[in-house]
């Protein structure tokens, strides 16, 4: 990538002795293992044409002993204007869709003006990245009147070349109509590497009582196997950073609840807060996460200084690590699953 600090970071992890790796980052070995670190380093080489970006991260399943992880990157609208696809990417069907969305988005005209000024690309790290890795693609719509969300979402999907059967469009419209009055905005996820996968609809900043009404309206019973959570999560004053739904020709049975316990997402705040340790401890007691991965999440906040640069005006860039949120997935007749979303922020 044009901003090479992340590539330098993972390269140093790979080249360092085991003891030094723990000093550089005490969490990655617990969460994803050295093999996935190598995958990320390779991925940063594959997408080296990306413009300078300052927000990256990892999605890490916490309840499984195998060390998997997805890598995501955030690009702003202005950064997107610097993006030029290499020849191989330019003829790839998935990347052609992404490029078409970007061209429409950059104009910021008509419905594109309602799209949030950042998009997210998420890459699967279950195996080494392909020569042309295909991401999942997420765009958001925020802060508008409820009636404006559906036209903006549909316009964004059209720009991305996504076609839906009529029944899926009806389900999406119904979910947006139910959620828009009680949330702060939406994000839409398209799994470009899995064309048959449902859309991911994320509704941001929603209260437990409102969520319980929505579940009832949609015929969802995500807590049927954990009835105590129906009270603890949905019948009090809880506010979730997001609820995630799968939108196909119906609403999928899996519901994701994103939980963010930080106020400002600073390293100092997260190192000294008691909220994250208490929450991780509760999840560990329920056997939803392993103790080792829970320890990895709590050790995550920190930073790393890139000493490979020699810029006497700006100094050495710093890579900060913060916890974004933990997502809990619920589905009837399936054990709950927990994932941590962990950020890198370049300063």
Image (cartoon, grey):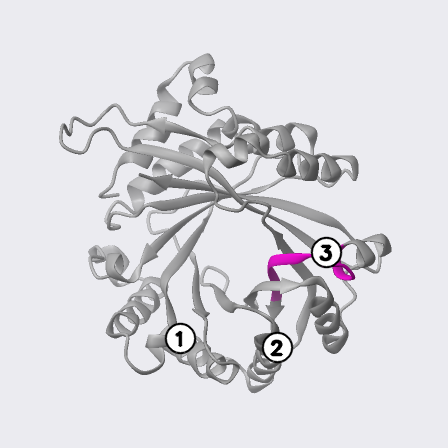
Boundaries of the magenta span: 233-245
Residue under circle 2? Answer: 175
**Label disc, if present, on residue 156 of the rendered structure:** 1
Residue drawn at (37%, 27%), measured in percent from left and top?
Answer: 304
Tag 2 near tag 3, CB within 8 Å: no
Query: Could you tell me which quadrant the C terminus lies in?
Result: top left
Residue drawn at (48%, 32%), measured in percent from left and top?
Answer: 268
Q: Residues within 10 Å of mark 3 (few under 14, many from 20)?
A: many
Residue drawn at (48%, 19%), measured in percent from left and top?
Answer: 22
Which image quarter: residue 16?
top left
In the image shown, does 294 or 125 lie closer to the viewer? 294
Whether residue 126 is visible here, answered yes or no, is: no
Q: Residues within 10 Å of mark 2 (few under 14, many from 20)?
A: many
Residue under circle 3? Answer: 330
How far from the left and from the top, in percent, is residue 337?
69, 48
Q: Say what secondary structure mark 3 lies in.
A: strand
Check residue 93 for magenta coloring. no
Q: Say what secondary structure mark 2 lies in.
A: helix
Above or below, 118 against 299 in this view is below
Tag 1 near tag 2, CB within 8 Å: no
Tag 3 near tag 1, CB within 8 Å: no
Which numbered disc flags the more N-terminal residue, 1 or 2?
A: 1
Q: Residues within 10 Å of mark 1 (few under 14, many from 20)?
A: many
State how far apart marks 3 and 1 are (Cα). Answer: 28 Å
Q: Say what secondary structure mark 1 lies in.
A: helix
Q: Is residue 262 left or right of residue 227?
A: left
How far from the left and from the top, in percent, is residue 97?
34, 69
In the image shown, does 172 or 180 lie closer to the viewer? 180
């Amino acid at each position: 990538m044009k901003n090479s600090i992340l590539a330098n970071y993972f390269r140093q992890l790979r080249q360092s002795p085991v003891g030094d790796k723990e000093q550089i980052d005490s969490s990655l070995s617990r969460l994803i293992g050295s093999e996935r670190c190598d995958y990320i380093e390779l991925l940063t080489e594959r997408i080296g044409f990306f413009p300078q970006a300052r927000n990256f991260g990892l999605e890490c399943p916490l309840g499984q002993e195998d060390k998997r992880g997805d890598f995501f990157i955030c690009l702003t609208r202005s950064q997107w204007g610097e993006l030029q696809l290499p020849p191989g990417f330019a003829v790839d069907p998935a990347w052609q869709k992404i490029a078409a969305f970007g061209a429409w988005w950059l104009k910021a005209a008509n419905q594109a003006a309602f799209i949030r000024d950042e998009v997210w690309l998420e890459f699967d790290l279950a195996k080494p990245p392909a020569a042309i890795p295909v991401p999942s693609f997420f765009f958001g719509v925020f802060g508008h009147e409820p009636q404006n969300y559906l036209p903006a979402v549909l316009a964004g999907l059209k720009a991305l070349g996504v076609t839906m059967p009529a029944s899926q469009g009806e389900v999406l419209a119904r979910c947006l109509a139910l959620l828009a009055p009680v949330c702060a905005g939406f994000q839409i996820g398209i799994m470009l590497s899995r064309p048959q996968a449902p859309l991911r609809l994320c509704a941001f900043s929603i209260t437990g009582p409102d969520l319980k009404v929505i579940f009832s309206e949609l015929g969802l019973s995500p807590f049927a196997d954990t009835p105590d959570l129906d009270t603890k999560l949905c019948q009090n004053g809880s506010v979730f950073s997001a609820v995630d739904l799968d939108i196909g020709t119906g609403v999928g049975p899996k519901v994701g609840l994103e939980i963010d316990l930080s106020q400002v997402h600073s390293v100092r705040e997260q190192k000294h807060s008691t909220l994250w340790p208490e929450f991780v401890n509760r999840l560990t007691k329920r056997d939803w996460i392993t103790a080792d991965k829970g320890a990895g999440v709590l050790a995550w906040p920190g930073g790393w200084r890139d000493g490979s640069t020699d810029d006497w005006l700006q100094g050495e860039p710093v890579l900060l690590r913060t916890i974004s949120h933990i997502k809990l997935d619920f589905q009837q007749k399936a054990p709950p699953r927990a994932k941590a979303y962990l950020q890198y922020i370049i300063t």
